[in-house]
Amino acid sequence: MKIQLYKIIYEGIDWRKNDDGTINLSVNQDQSDNANRGTNSVDTRVFGKKSDVLFGDGTGNLLSKSLYDTAESKEDTIKYYNDIIEFIKNGRTGKIEPSENVSPQTISAVAKWFSENKSDNYIIYAAKKAITRIEKEADVYTKTRNRINNEYNNDKVARYMTGTVPGTTVKFISLFSMTDFNFSDAIKHGKIRQNGNTDSILGIDAENRKKTYKNTELSNIDIKYDDNITPDIKHNFSIDDQSKYHDKISYDLNDKSYTTINQFIDKSIQYAAYVLHQEKFYPDFIISPPSSSKFNEYYCTNLSKKLNIPYNKDFFKRNLINVKFDKDKDIEEMRKDGFSEKDIMQFEYQVKNLAYKEISYEISEPIRNFIEKYRNLFENISFELHSREKTPINDVFQSIMIYSYKIIIDQLKSSSDVISKQLLNNFRSGTIKIYNKRYNINHIINQVISIIKFKIGFKKFNTVLLETYNRVKKYSEQLKQQGYEIRFDAKKSKITSFKKQFRPYLHNVYIVADKYLNKKDNLTSQYKNAKFLIFDEDINSGATLKLCIDALQEKIPENKSDNIMCLVNAYSSKGW
C-alpha cells in the first residue's frame, strides 16, 4: 500500500490568479512544510519522517506551529485557564504563571478581565467556556502527537489525525488538514467563496470583491484546475463505467478532465484504506450523512469497492421538521458547559428557524424542479418593461414561489372544495399585487403566465401547483402542532449556519432512513453488533458526525462506540 501511495507525488496546494479573474488550483510536487502551511494551505502529504511530522522540516512559515508545538500549546492553555479558576476560588491569592506556549493574545485577553474589574463569576464562566472549546481542539492534536510518538518506523510515518467526535466517545480519523474550506468547495463545486484568502490571491481589498446582480451579495469565484482546465464536476464524481478499482484512469493525465485534483481524491481513497488497516478497524458497512454534493457518494462508492464492503447510500435522511430542543436536558447541559441564558435563548430560536427554513425548502421543491426543467424559457424574462436586461433565474424562482405561496395560503383559509381548479384560476388571474424592493414580481409573473400558457401548458403547471399546495397543507399541520410559523423562505439550511459552539446540542436532525427500518427488525438483526464507518467530506465542529452517531445509536442501542468509526477527508485546522 505504501509503495502505491508513494507513486502519487503531487503533495502541496497552489493557488494563483488567472488573467480572466478566476483562480487556478493545482496540487504540486512540494512535500515540504512550506507548501502545506499558511492561510490558504491544505496538508496533502501522506508520509514523512517521524521528526518532520512532529516538529516540521524547518521550511515552514515562522508563525505556524508544528504538531508537537500545537499540542503543547493547547495543553498549557487549558492549564492556564484552570489556574485562573483556582486563583479566583482562593480569594485571588497566589500567582498565575503562564508557560511560554500560551499565546500572547490569550494572556492579553485574561489581563483585560482583571483590568476591567470583571466579577469572580464572570471570570470563572469565561475561563470554563474557553476550556470547553480548547479541550475539543487539544483532543485531536494530543492524540495524533501521542500516536506518532509511539511509531516504530521513523522513515515512513503516516500523517493522518485522530480524535474523538465532540459530544460522543466515538473516534474519528482525518486524512488531511486544511485552514480554509474553500479547498473542499473548489473540489465539490468548482467555485469558491470570497474571503481574506481569495483577496490575497487576487490582490484586492475586501471592498473590491465581486458582487452578484444589483450588488446585493458576494458572488462566488470560478475555479480552474491545472493551468486553466475548467472543472467538470459531473465527470469528477461520475460513478459510471468504472473498474473494480476506484482510480478511473490509473493516474493517466492525458485525459484533460482528469486533473491533479481528481488524482488527490483518488489518493485519499487509497490512503483511507491504508489508515483503516493501521487503526485495525474493519467495517461491515459504510454510511454517510446526507450531502448536497456528489463528493460523499463518489468517495464512499469507490471506498466500498476498495474495501469490498457495502455502502448504504441513503442510510440517513434529513428530518429537520422534527428537530427538537429539549428544554430540560439541553438547558442543563448548556449551563453546565458555561452557556449564558442569552446564548440558550439564541440557540432555541435558531433551532426553530432551522426547522421552518428546511420545511420551506421542501415546499418549494416542485416549483424549483419545474423551473429547472424549463430553464431555457425562464432565463429570457426581462427585468423591467421594455428592458433588454434579463432577470436572474433565482429571482424568477423567488417570484413564482412567493406568488404561488400567497395564493396557496389564501386557498387554505377558504372552504372551497375544488382546490385544483381554484388554485389555477387564482394564479392565472394575476390579481395579487406583491412588491419587492429588488425587482417587480408582478412584471415577472405576467411573463411567467405567458410562457406557461403558450409554451408549456397550464395542465403541466397545475400539477406542480397542486403538489406545492399539498406540501404546504401537510407541513402547516406539523408547524401548528410544534408552534412554528407558516412562512416562505426557500433556502436550504445547513448545520454550519449554527454558531460552532451550538452545533453539538442539536437533536433529531438526522434519522435512519425508512427503508432500513421497515424490514422486520432489520436494524436489530442484520446490523446488531455490526461495525459502521461513517464518512463525511470534512470536520469542523463535529456536529454532523455527532448527529449521525446519535441517530444510529438511538435505533441500535446495543451498538457500542467501539463499533463505530468516523472518517473524514480533511480536518479544519492550521496545517502542520
Image (cartoon, rainbow, N blue to C red):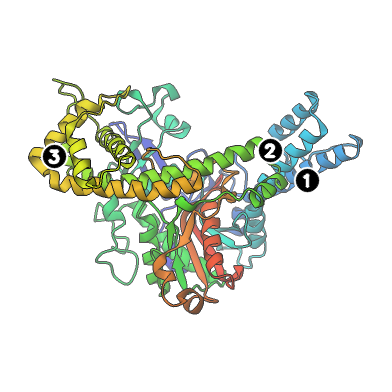
Question: Which residue sits at x=78%, y=35%?
Answer: 123
Q: Are marks 3 and 1 in contact (CB under 8 Å)?
A: no
Q: Foreground residue, 290 or 94?
A: 290
User: Within 10 angstroms of label 1, few (less than 14), some, or many (20 or more) residues?
Assistant: some
Q: Earlier in the sequence, mark 2 or mark 3?
A: 2
Q: Amino acid at mark 3?
A: Ile
Q: Which mark is residue 452?
A: 3
Q: How many angstroms separate mark 3 from mark 1 (CA)?
A: 67 Å
Q: How many angstroms separate mark 1 from mark 2 (CA)?
A: 23 Å
Q: Amino acid at mark 2?
A: Ser
Question: Which residue sits at x=56%, y=46%?
Answer: 573
Relative image position of residue 330 (x, y in whole percent): 64, 49
Q: Foreground residue, 93 or 10?
A: 93
Q: Secondary structure at mark 1?
A: helix
Q: Quadrant of residue 117?
A: top right
Question: Which residue sits at x=12%, y=34%?
Answer: 450
Q: Amino acid at mark 1?
A: Lys
Q: Residue furthest left?
A: 454
Relative image position of residue 550 (x, y in whole percent): 56, 60
Q: Earlier in the sequence, mark 3 or mark 1?
A: 1
Q: Secondary structure at mark 2?
A: loop
Q: Which of pointers 3 and 1 indicates the residue nearer the eye?
A: 3
Relative image position of residue 20 (x, y in whole percent): 27, 31
Residue, disc 1: 79
For the question of whether residue 494 can be seen, the reply is no
Q: Secondary structure at mark 3?
A: helix
Residue, disc 2: 340
